[in-house]
Image: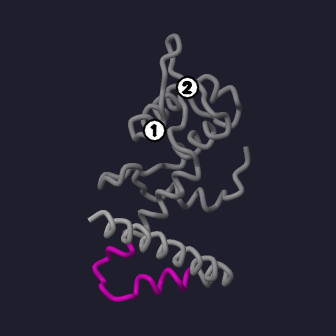
Amino acid sequence: MVFSSGKRLQLAMTKAFSIFGSSSRPQLGPFEQQVLEELWAHGNATVREVLAHGKIHQAYTTVMTTMDRLYKKGLLDRVAEGRAFRYTPRHSVEELQRVNALESIRQLLGSGDASLLPLSYLVEAVSAHDAQLLDELQLLVERKRREIQSQESKAREQR
C-alpha cells in the first residue's frame, strides 16, 4: 500500500503525539514507523508474516520487540494466535495525523501568548501552502461558529 501523504506521514509519525490527550506522548523511531506502516498496508499480521512480506529485514526478535513496544504505546491491538500474537493497528493513518495536528495546534494556542499572534502563524502557514485553503478555512470557521451559536441557543431554551 502506498501512502499519498508519505512525507506528511513521516513528519507526523516522527513527532510526538498523544492518542488520549495525556502528557506522556510516545514517540516513534524510524523502525517502529516502518513496522506500523507495514501493518497498515496489510491490516494485521504476526511477526512471521511481517517478515515474510519481505520489506523488513531484521531479526525475528527485533521485530517482535518492536511490535510489543508499539502495543505498549497503545498503537497496536493484539490477539493470541497459537504461540504468537496477531497485531492490528489500533488507529488509521488519518486518525494519527488528526491527533498530531490537533495536539500541535493546541500547543501553539496554549503557548501563553494571549495575542492573536499564534493564529496569525497558522494563517500564514496555510496561505503559504495554498491560498485557496484560506477560503476553505474561512468556511470551516463560519460553519463552526453557526454550530456553536445553535448549541448555545438550545442551551438557553432548556433553562
Q: Amino acid at mark 2?
A: Tyr
Q: Which of the two discs, 1 and 2, sits closer to the camera?
A: 1
Residue stretch rendered in magenta on the structure: 107-125
Which of the 4 image quarters holds residue 124? bottom right
Residue 8, compared with residue 84, is above or below; it is below
Residue under numbered circle 2: 60
Q: Name the residue nearer the viewer: 137 or 159.
A: 159
SS under mark 2: helix
SS under mark 1: helix
Residue 77, compared with residue 135, is above or below; it is above
Which of the 4 image quarters holds residue 69? top left
User: Which residue is found at the position 40% from the left and 88% from the top?
Assistant: 117
Q: Name the residue nearer the viewer: 70 or 124.
A: 124
Which percent across, then down, holds residue 131? 66, 84
Residue under numbered circle 1: 70
Q: Amino acid at mark 1?
A: Leu
Q: Which mark is residue 3?
A: none
Residue 112 in the magenta stretch? The answer is: yes
Mark toward the start of the polypeptide (1 vs 2): 2
Which percent across, then down, holds residue 8? 61, 62
Q: Is residue 24 left or right of residue 144?
A: left
Q: Is residue 116 left or right of residue 53?
A: left
User: Which residue is found at the position 58% from the left and 77% from the top?
Assistant: 137
Q: Is residue 141 left or right of residue 73?
A: right
Residue 37, compared with residue 7, is above or below; it is above
